[in-house]
Amino acid sequence: MSSHLSQGASGAIRRFAGWVAGGSVGHPMLEGIDYSDELKDSPSQMETCFAIFANVLELNDQGDPINEKYAQRRGATFLYQYCTGKLPPGEADLEFWEVEFY
């Protein structure tokens, strides 16, 4: 087994980082919410968002992501809840294992 992330897993993390930085993560869930402004003074919340993405992301036997869109949505769910104080319509509460730091 390789000790490095697969290209697929690395790409998923890179895309998520790009979407978060560009303000388009979770589109359209976060449309109209300026989460970048909310998070600029709270880097620990950004860390939580990335932890959720990484905790939820599942990889196949080759190390490639199989639920990247869902992992992105769960990270966006956290940002929505952090910025608005409520869950997005139709989204389940974040579970303990999703927000755990390793």
Image: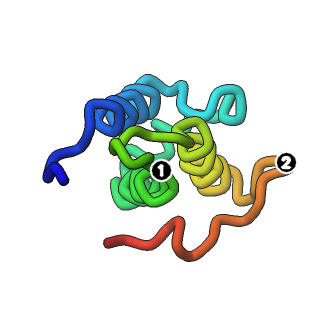
Residue at screen point 59% across, 54% down: 78
In the rendered structure, which amino acid carries the disc numbered 2?
Answer: Pro
Quadrant position of the C terminus in the picture: bottom left
The residue that disc 2 covers is 89
- In the image, 51: left or right of 67? left
The spot of residue 25 in percent (x, y) is: 54, 32
Residue at screen point 53% across, 66% down: 98
- In the image, 87: left or right of 60? right
Residue at screen point 50% across, 67% down: 99
Residue at screen point 57% across, 76% down: 96
The answer to which of 36 and 15 lies nearer the viewer is 15
Quadrant position of the N terminus in the picture: bottom left
Q: Residues within 10 Å of mark 2 (few under 14, many from 20)?
A: few
Image marks 2 and 1: residues in contact by CB distance under 8 Å = no
The spot of residue 63 in percent (x, y) is: 34, 44
Q: Is residue 77 above or below residue 92?
A: above
